[in-house]
Image (cartoon, grey):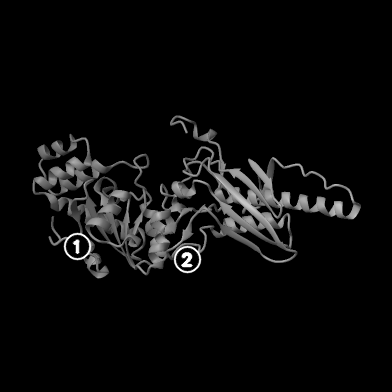
Amino acid sequence: MGKNKDPHTWRKGYTTGSCAAGAAKAGCLLLKGELAGRGKAASTGEPAETKREKTTVDITLPDGGRLVLPVAKQELRFSEACATIIKDAGDDPDVTDGLAIVVTTRLLAPQGIIRVEGGKGVGRVSKPGLQVPVGEAAINPVPRRMIEAAVREVFPREEVEVIIEIPGGEEAAKHTLNPRLGIEGGLSILGTTGVVRPMSEEAFKTSILPELDQAVAYGHQRIILTPGHYGFRTATEQLGVPAEAVVQMSNFVGFLLEEAAYRGVREVVLFGHIGKLIKVAGGIFHTHNRMADARMEILLAESALAGLSTTRLRELAALPTLEGAAGLLTEAGEGSILNGLARKASRRAKEYVRDQMEIGTVFTLLDGQLIGWDENAPSIFARAGWSWPGFGTEP
């Protein structure tokens, strides 16, 4: 997608769940057509009619609307049909865009259930806390219902087997959260609406929640919220925090705090690069720089309140990055200013969730060095049984 493209013209796409449902219905239509042809041949003695393949198929969306999907390929075998729909993510950046969703359908009995299973390229759940039980194919509940509804439009009561495959899915899954979430061997069949809305913030938020749900399912009442991969690596590799207790929240600090409180999490440590988390000290809970970028202003205000000279404040203000400014304060023996900002971030975050949780804050540099924290952070680490560097509560 071009960087300068007008957001109002962004093209919608469709989810892997919609692709699977559409391909399942296309296969069922092919099966039903073949069976109808055989029935006519048996009753009249005439040759079975050749079934014309459909080039599109329509399915019901969860909100009650309809979606028309192009069918890329169909094949009718003796007892089964195979249909393929190519995943189209529209203008949304997605590793699944362009992948083939291949569905094989088999009619098993005149009456029975719909058996939906994942084949090659579809992951399998190995850890608790997701919407799918351990051991089952990673086909989420809403897409599963969409598939069942699509099949029932063709076969209202018959027992049907549906097997979903994604060629290349195992390799593509390495670029998703699936390995971290314990989904092994491939991609997930996802989608709550059936339609991909480009650059949807709500969709991005929803995609983060499985990590939080997994942390809760593992019994963690104390968790780490970090903006991204740097914080995750520092917490897990340097401090030994269990990976399942670390949730990458991106820019959505307030959203994840509220969701953690809703799930009964007792204590949270905000842990990550100072350039992101210092904003929380200023009451900013969406940290994308286009939403709010007062990093240096927050640092300068705190430094001025701490009594730094005008000369030092000008020196800090002239630096191009907050990391450089934070490093200068530490080298100058003014690290207590960063601790004070961590303390303010924790207080503002606790107020944000109406005192429903205890919160600590830890600031790092890009190399993982811890440069500021409040008193709550090491206390929460201790209660959780995690390692904390042995240098007390002051940098």
**Element carrying mark 2:** loop
**Element carrying mark 1:** loop
Q: Amino acid at mark 2?
A: Val
Residue 284 percent location from the top left of the image: 33, 49
Q: Residue at x 21, y 42 (%)?
A: 323
User: Residue 224 vs residue 39: left or right?
Assistant: left
Checking the image for residue 134, the label placed there is: 2
For the question of whether residue 243 can be seen, the reply is yes
Circle nearer the viewer, 1 or 2: 2
Front-most of 133 and 390? 133
Instruction: Pick whichever of labels 1 and 2 is earlier in the sequence.
Output: 2
Q: Amino acid at mark 1?
A: Trp
Front-most of 333 and 135? 135
Residue 210 percent location from the top left of the image: 44, 58
For the question of whether residue 69 can be seen, the reply is no
Checking the image for residue 62, the label placed there is: none
Circle 2: is it few (<14), some (14-19), or many (20+) Cα within 10 Å? some
Checking the image for residue 388, the label placed there is: 1
Callouts 1 and 2 close, C-beta under 8 Å:
no
Front-most of 242 and 332? 242
Q: How many marks?
A: 2
